Amino acid sequence: MLSLALLTASACVGPQKGKLETPSLEAPAQLSDLDDFAAARNAFALMPVGDPQRAALREQLRDYVVGYVDEALGQDRSEAAIAGLEQLCELWTASELQQPRPDPAIAELAGRVYASVAPAGDEHSALLALALQQHFGDAQTSAEAEAGYAQLQDWIERSEGFTGDPRYGALLDRLLEDASSVFPSPFLTRELTGSYLAQFRRAQTEGVSDPRTAYTGYLVARAHLRADDPAAAVAAMEQMEIDEAAEALRELIRDATLGAEPSPPDIAQLMREFLPAPDHQLPPSIVRQSWGIVDNLARMALADAPDDAPAHLARGRVLRYRGLVPAAILHYEQAFAAKGPATDREDLHLAWSELAGLLQLELEDAVRTTQGDPEGDAQVDAALERVQGFHERAAKAWPLRPVSPGLNVAWMTVALRDFDRGRPDQAESLLSQAVQLEPHPLALSLLGTIALRRGQLEVARDRVSSISELPFPDQLDRYDWQIQSQMQLAEIERFADDPGASVEHLREALRQLNTLIAYPGLAAPQRVDYLTRRAQVFFALGELELAMKDFRAAHNIAPGRASTYSPVLIFAVTHGHLGQAREILSAALGSEGTDDELAVYYALWVIDLCARQGAPAPEDAQAHLAALVENPESDPWSQTLARHGLGQLDGDALIAAAGQTRQRSEAFFYAGLQRWRGGEAEASLELMRKVLEAQMIGDFEYEMAQSYLRWQELPKAPRAVEMATPPAP
């Protein structure tokens, strides 16, 4: 993965003005995984066409993508193969494609992709594969690809009467626009412009059938500009009768690009003609084509004027659209640091918000890539510091108009990481700062959870209660957080030994859940989420059959959804409901959404509960643990836990094998379960205390250990829920 320290060093242009360095990033020496590939893509995107290192890095990226597509085809994953081809297309600018260089490996690969997608009737993917085959093949291969295109063209023209979309013209045009927006090769550009002109001539002789025919000159110009050939665009428009708007565009293209030297101000104006508006409703192919045109023009401007602010901003926006976050950030920073204005003031505020979003994405990526890495704190801290520095600058530049996403989102992102890593003090500090800046339901909910786990019930109650006072523009979002807060408040009151108040909160949550679930237009993912929550509420109210009915409904709708199982299984296990726990476990182990790590935990819980109640261990749970132990590719810690569950490792050995804080917390918990089964009640509870001392507040084991310590027992028989009055019918 790209070193954040190196990235920061390359990007620290700050707010100063003056001569700017050409933005660059260092690529990894080898591409061993997707993170390396992403870093190399970003570095490659910043290289000018004439950079002497560009060819070598392209070769590395090419080899990686070719291998990926080959593997996808071998696994019959056509969609992944097409995505790989599109990634391959990014390795050449439109100007580089104007001089074809045969590449037999790419041509052969494209031919295989074509053979995979064409029989299924996927014309879009088939045409892209044919285009790569035609461009990179030898003379015979190119001729075969062109023959394949002629067959596709003939089939489309013969079946055109059965299709038709009056908004976007003929099907062939749309297919060519789509393919050339990704890969503007000379062949595709020629065929697209030829199709436009054929439609135009047909309209002149047969009458207008496509509303876009009146804009043929503009469409032809777009096709040539996507191919980075403004001279061809002007020449084509000169051969046609065009309206005043098209004439003005033609002259702007001429003035901007065809003088003795490019004209950056005219290029900036020309780029604005093609920038998609934030609220556009354009087809994806036209959007891709527009960004491709903007990229060509921005590269042209920067080649002549490396300090050109509008061109840096335009390139940043192109790279943002393509998901190349680190590279995009550098161009945005260059745009803001340049001498001249990058754009008008309203658009500039939008650009600052766009950069805020990019820096937030970079922070989230740092959190993601360092997950499980004890040494990853420095990378996350550096990313957070960069976000904080940006927002300090933004506050000075826009004192009356905050940019979005705000700094509170960054603080919550890192707080979630600290919470997950067993650092509640740091998490609480960042969440408190976030709430002071702008109250957010997630921050308040987490603060309530931290306070509850610490036994600070009044603080927890205050934090969670304040969620209902927040404004929610979205009605469904408001319902969602109200239900969540009612369920949290019910748990807080249970810990406060006020079962009556707890039941009242559960009833309110149930009332709102009933309203939402009864709505016939509720989307399936939301219905599954609400059914799972209602199952939790029913469990807490002692309505086991109703809880299991909702669980089964949620499981039937989305058996692959992992989050359906954990909350209900935890309740069933901690309260000693063996029959329900076994049923939930069986469903979870049969779900593709349950990974090996989750399955180990689930199996250990239910095997322990069976042992406590004198029942045989579930065969599927034992079989899963045994398979995990025998699989050499399994996670080592999951294997260790599985061996403990199979009786191959006792509690002391499990604790000795634990290294990281989370592992030690888990080891204390599962060793504690074993001690309780062995009749060592006090030793078991002492290990449960060590679980809490590890402060992995967000872990299942913490939640379960806290319940066992509160009860001073691990239930051997089903434990009745605590309530002062029966639930409402």
Image: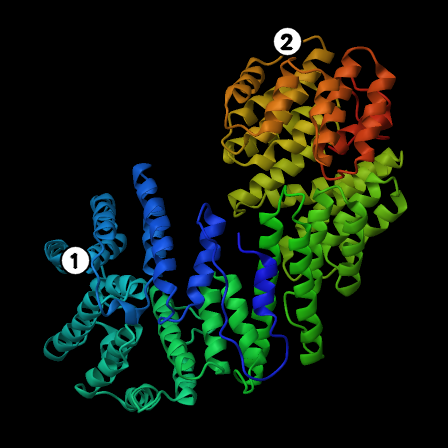
Q: How is the image coloured?
A: rainbow
Element type where label 1 sits in the image: helix
Residue 555 drawn above or below residue 416: above
Residue 319 drawn above or below residue 30: below
Instruction: Tell me the kind of residue under disc 2.
Output: Pro
Residue depicted at x 46% and y 46%: 33
Quadrant containing the C terminus in the rendered view: top right
Depth check, mark 2 against mark 1: the one in front is 2
Determine which residue is flagged by label 1: 156
Say whether marks 2 and 1 touch (CB < 8 Å).
no
Q: Which mark is residue 616?
A: 2
Residue 579 appearing in the image: no
Residue depicted at x 71% and y 15%: 650
State the image coordinates of residue 723 (x, y, percent, origin top left): 83, 30
Distance CA(mark 2)–CA(mark 1): 65 Å
State the image coordinates of residue 572 (x, y, percent, origin top left): 70, 24
Residue depicted at x 39% and y 58%: 57
Element type where label 2 sits in the image: loop
| Residue 394 figure quarter | bottom right
Tell which of 661 and 573 is nearer to you: 661
Tell which of 427 and 538 is nearer to you: 427
402 with respect to 239 (left or right): right
State the image coordinates of residue 443 (x, y, percent, origin top left): 74, 53
Question: How crowded is the residue under tag 2: few (<14 C-alpha within 10 Å), some, or many (20+)?
Answer: few
Instruction: Tell me the kind of residue under disc 1.
Output: Ile
Residue depicted at x 34% and y 42%: 72
Tell which of 119 and 315 is nearer to you: 315
State the image coordinates of residue 514 (x, y, percent, origin top left): 65, 41
Question: How crowded is the residue under tag 1: few (<14 C-alpha within 10 Å), some, or many (20+)?
Answer: some
